[in-house]
Image: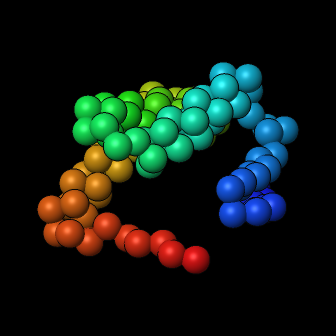
Amino acid sequence: MSIESTDKATLNIEINIDELNSTQVRMIKSINSLLTHTLTTSDETEYFNGSSELLRLLASLIQKASFSKKEGHIDYGKQVLEYCSDILAEQVYEDSLVKYDN
């Protein structure tokens, strides 16, 4: 993935989609659009609903990852979401969400 900013009003993100299927690509586009909307909205309802929908879409995309489709009786897609939910809940309540600032 490469990120290029041509000016202050535009951010171009390139993602190699060679190993992604069309559903995954569509979901990435939807997530990107919803993320931008959620980060810029001034409406409380849109902020909460958009944030919820964004997390739901991310969870769905994670479940559609190639790793989760490995052969066997283990439902990796469900397990990884349970793991992520536990970690996220801990970090939210401990006020220790990781902050990335480049």
Q: Residue furthest right?
A: 18
Residue 11, horizontal then vertical, whole percent: 71, 55
Residue 71, horizontal then vertical, whole percent: 58, 29
Q: Residue furthest left?
A: 93
Q: Is residue 43 above or below residue 16?
A: above
In percent of the image, x 84 and y 38: which residue is there? Answer: 18
Asked which colour scheme the image uses, the reply is rainbow
Q: Please tell me in which quadrant of the rendered image residue 56 appears.
A: top left
Residue 16, horizontal then vertical, whole percent: 81, 46
In percent of the image, x 41 and y 72: which residue is there? Answer: 99
Quarter of the rendering occupied by the C terminus: bottom right
- Compared across the picture, whether 61 is left or right of 90 comes to right
In percent of the image, x 72 and y 54: which residue is there? Answer: 10
The residue closer to the viewer here, 102 or 64, is 102
Q: Is residue 8 above or below residue 29?
A: below
Q: Residue furthest top?
A: 23
Residue 30, horizontal then vertical, whole percent: 58, 30
Tell me if I can see residue 69 in this picture: no
Q: Residue furthest bottom?
A: 102
The residue closer to the viewer here, 87 or 34, is 34
Q: Is residue 7 above or below residue 85?
A: below
Quarter of the rendering occupied by the N terminus: bottom right
In percent of the image, x 76 and y 63: which residue is there? Answer: 7
Q: Please tell me in which quadrant of the rendered image residue 92 appears.
A: bottom left
